[in-house]
Image: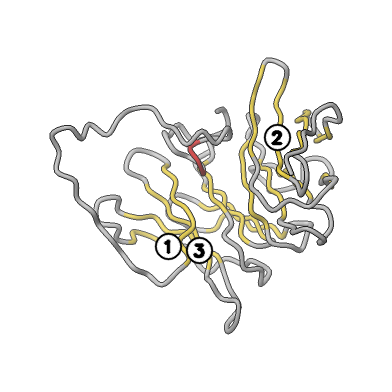
Amino acid sequence: MPGYYPSHWPVECGGNRRQKAANGGLNARNATPEVTTVTNGRWNVMTVWRGPGELFLGGTMPAFTGPPPYGWLQRLDYRTLDVLSESPQLSCGEHVWCGAIAAHENGSIYKVNGSYLHRLDEHCGVLLERKLPVDQAHNGLLLLSDGTVVTKDLRLSGQGPSTITRLDPETLELVGAPLALPEGSMGRIASDLTDKGEYIYIPGIERVWRIRVEPDRLSMDDDWSPQYR
């Protein structure tokens, strides 16, 4: 979808529709498979690709006790899994959750971790840091067709409503007011770009909610909220 670096896998699940599919094939008919394994003692959450051969790994520290947790980003050698470069420790507001990463069309890697969003360069250097308006762990990160970044905080049943936040990719300033949802949301978010507009889909506690993407704000689609639980 528009907004991403021209890569076959720039975001979790391969794209905003979460089809977990990519163009091309393994060409493995006459190949001998090899497995390279690295144990680093960290919570390795996900990898994305930027340019050809540019593999990035994002994660957090699984620290529910002990020193404060932090997020991190690494660029790996995709053959050996050796670390080519690594970010400094990324603030997470002492929230322990997995977070997410995505490769933007502007070349930057965006990472949400706890209650912070970071913009990093191709060498894992921090370009910008933003404390999100909701002091809660976040577990959703997507890029919309205009390049803006959207993320959502994590709430379990009985913890109140979740909030979706939209940010400018260059400055990490807010684009419109954060939108409080009718319910809390544990699951991650998806989106789709159609001839009728662009929509964000969010699983709540009882229903799936659809959000309309407008130029300068997000709004609830009151005509679409199927119950699934």
Instruction: Kindly give the residue lying farthest to the front in the view shown.
Output: 229
Q: Residues within 10 Å of mark 3 (few under 14, many from 20)?
A: many
Task: Give percent across and percent down for residue 172.
Answer: 69, 48
Q: CA distance from mark 1 to mark 2?
A: 32 Å
Pair 3/2: label in front: 2
Quadrant of the snapshot with the C terminus: top right
User: Which residue type carries mark 2?
Assistant: Ile
Residue found at x 14% / y 43%: 32
Residue found at x 68% / y 69%: 93
20 above or below 198?
below
Task: Give percent across and percent down for residue 53.
Answer: 32, 43
Circle 3: element type = strand
| Front-lying residue, 204 or 148 | 204
For label 1, the residue is 86
Circle 1: element type = strand
Residue found at x 58% / y 52%: 119
Q: Residues within 10 Å of mark 1 (few under 14, many from 20)?
A: some
For label 3, the residue is 72
Q: In the visual, does 216 lie left or right of 32?
A: right
